[in-house]
């Protein structure tokens, strides 16, 4: 059972509670969290469980056709496709320059605090925190909830609050900590909140069960994984290593299945095979839920389908040439070129119309490329060969490629696609943490601790799965009828991928270089890249090199510049600074440096 997907239809009393909660989104700095709801109907087992459901429901940042608190649905998308992937040089904004122009300065790090996208994301995330705080507050007060059950409810609420604050911390750095005890919500952002995030995940780890009644709920091991990630972002490598070792060896998903990589990489991105051994924590999505909207169908990604295609709209989120080149491998060793991958780039159909002949790149490639990127002449799931320019709104602006991890299949579209809006929704879950991510974070912690053989084994475990021939993309049996299936004897491209040897893991720096690159390959288009680059301390050199390279191919990022000391974090939204003015007329929120 998919908990969040099955519990979106609330009874009338809960809808009233949710409406009251939502009303706090714009003004959370103006009224105390503790006064958001009347106590009588809420401080009961039924009321508290309804509040907890509302806290989960805020994970996708969506309500009533837009983001929580207003703004375009995509502005608060939980997969951070704008703030983590586009800003990380993995994808172009796509479409054309005049569509959603506020994304362009985010991609080029020229945006300021007045950009409404930052305010939308801020409000939607604090709405989630507000719901968690109310759950905690009234759970403690409820007299009809057994203590053991209270501990689980509080564990889930604090896990979710840790997640929401993690989102804010990695985006804005210094943000106000508001919890269930806060009396003055105009709290300054002058404290590092990492210790509080740690405490929430530690509490959740100690109090949540290993197995949950519904798959969408956080369990003990999801909390342990997020605690390890929290340590890693603080460079607490020993603590991260210790907790990840326990997770890798003992962790199970919410259904009680031991964590493991799926045999096929592609099955992480298909609604028919989700909630599996690789699922650590997903935001649950569902199509055709009876609401007549796509609010529960990854509405934040509704723009991110090929343009002028069977998907109707909208041509955003186009993988970059720089990313595509990263999947080249040495035809003998099967390893990537960590330093010179942009030399001799993968051939594209840039500037070639769909009615002109084109032959795809014939060199050796990592097979994960063709489950991540749609490119001309290669099967686009079971929708036919990607036709190239006819599915792209403006090649010169955004390049020739299309996203693929979030695209539903033609054969199962009646079940897993939702056409209730002007752009599609999808039942494909959003991965917050999956086990491959855990393995690569664990590898990083092991490398930092000097345990290079263990780090290499974790990376090779990810690469072994990628090298499974059963998971390769194959050609169609009949290219004129892609629904007829694939010819399992002929791959769609020349796939060559192998494991690392001790030669490539001879030093800590060599190991880290390989691990960093593996995260790029494995987790591309999943919202991690920008935040990884920042915590590794290599954002400036990596992204400025990206601007130099990609800017010669597409016009969208020309003039982009990452400015050290400024660009590591997004600006505190000016609207929130204005709202934080206290009785003395001074704002309590302090802007990030150099904005």
Image (cartoon, helix red, strand yellow):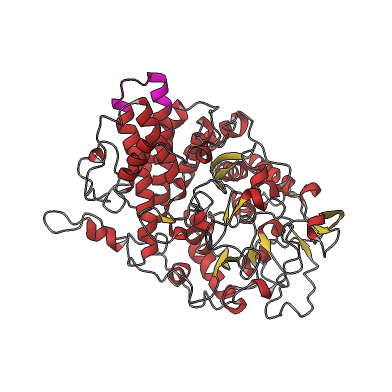
Q: On the rendered structure, is 189 left or right of 529?
A: left
Q: Nearer the viewer, residue 454 or 35?
A: 35
Q: Is residue 503 visible?
A: yes
Q: Using the image, determine if residue 17 lies above or below residue 328.
A: above
Range drawn in magenta: 140-152
Q: On the rendered structure, is 4 left or right of 260?
A: left
- The residue shown at (64%, 65%) is 402
Q: Furthest-right residue in view?
A: 489
Q: Nearer the viewer, residue 54 or 320?
A: 54
Q: Position of residue 463 (x, y in %)?
A: 71, 48
Q: Furthest-left residue in view?
A: 584
- The residue shown at (79%, 66%) is 363
Q: Is residue 75 magenta?
A: no
Q: On the rendered structure, is 451 left or right of 290?
A: right
Q: Is residue 238 visible?
A: no
Q: On the rendered structure, is 511 left or right of 38?
A: right
Q: Position of residue 103 (x, y in %)?
A: 46, 68
């Amino acid at each position: 059972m998919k908990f969040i997907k099955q519990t979106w239809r609330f009874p009338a009393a809960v809808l009233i509670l949710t409406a009251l909660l939502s009303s706090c989104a714009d003004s959370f700095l103006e009224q105390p969290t503790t006064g958001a709801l009347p106590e009588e109907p809420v401080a009961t087992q039924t009321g508290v469980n309804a509040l907890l459901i509302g806290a989960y429901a805020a994970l996708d940042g969506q309500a009533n056709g837009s983001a929580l608190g207003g703004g375009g649905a995509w502005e608060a998308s939980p997969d951070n496709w704008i703030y983590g992937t586009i800003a990380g040089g993995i994808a172009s904004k796509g479409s054309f320059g005049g569509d959603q122009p506020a994304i362009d300065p985010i991609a080029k790090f020229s945006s300021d605090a007045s950009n409404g996208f930052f305010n939308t994301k801020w409000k939607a995330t604090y709405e989630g925190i507000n719901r968690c705080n109310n759950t905690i507050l009234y759970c403690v007060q409820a007299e009809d909830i057994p203590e053991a059950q209270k501990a689980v409810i509080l564990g889930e609420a604090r896990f979710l609050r840790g997640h929401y604050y993690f989102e804010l911390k990695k985006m804005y750095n210094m943000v106000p900590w508001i919890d269930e005890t806060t009396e003055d919500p105009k709290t300054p952002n002058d404290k590092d909140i990492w210790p509080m995030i740690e405490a929430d995940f530690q509490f959740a780890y100690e109090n949540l069960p290993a197995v949950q009644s519904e798959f969408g709920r956080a369990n003990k091991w999801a909390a342990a994984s997020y605690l390890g990630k929290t340590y890693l972002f603080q460079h607490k490598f020993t603590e991260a290593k210790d907790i990840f070792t326990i997770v890798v060896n003992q962790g199970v998903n919410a259904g009680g299945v031991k964590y493991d990589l799926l045999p096929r990489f592609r099955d992480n991105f298909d609604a028919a095979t989700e909630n599996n051994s690789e699922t650590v924590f997903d935001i649950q999505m569902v199509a055709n839920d009876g609401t007549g909207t796509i609010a529960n169908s990854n509405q934040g990604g509704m723009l991110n389908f090929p343009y002028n295609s069977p998907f109707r709209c909208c041509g955003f989120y186009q993988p970059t040439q720089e990313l595509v080149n990263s999947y080249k491998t040495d035809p003998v060793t099967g390893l990537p070129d960590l330093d010179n991958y942009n030399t001799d780039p993968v051939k594209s159909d840039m500037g070639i119309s769909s009615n002109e002949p084109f032959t795809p790149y014939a060199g050796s490639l990592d097979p994960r490329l063709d489950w991540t990127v749609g490119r001309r002449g290669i099967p686009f799931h079971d929708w036919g060969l990607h036709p190239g320019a006819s599915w792209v709104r403006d090649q010169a602006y955004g390049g020739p490629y299309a996203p693929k991890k979030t695209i539903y299949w033609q054969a199962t579209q009646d079940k897993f696609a939702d056409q209730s809006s002007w752009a599609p929704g999808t039942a494909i879950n959003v991965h917050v943490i999956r086990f491959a991510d855990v393995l690569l974070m664990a590898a990083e912690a092991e490398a930092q601790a000097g345990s290079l053989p263990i780090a290499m084994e974790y990376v090779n475990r990810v690469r072994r799965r990628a090298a499974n021939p059963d998971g390769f993309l194959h050609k169609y049996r009949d290219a004129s009828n892609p629904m007829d299936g694939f010819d399992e004897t002929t791959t769609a491209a020349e796939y060559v991928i192998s494991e690392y040897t001790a030669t490539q893991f001879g030093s800590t720096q060599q190991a880290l270089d390989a691990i960093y690159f593996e995260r790029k390959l494995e987790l591309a288009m999943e919202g991690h890249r920008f935040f990884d680059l920042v915590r590794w301390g290599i954002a400036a050199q990596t992204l400025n090199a990206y601007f130099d390279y990609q800017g010669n191919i597409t016009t969208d990022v020309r003039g982009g510049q990452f400015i050290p000391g400024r660009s590591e974090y997004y600006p505190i939204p000016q609207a929130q600074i204005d709202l934080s003015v206290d009785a003395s007329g001074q704002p309590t929120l302090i802007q990030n440096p150099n904005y």
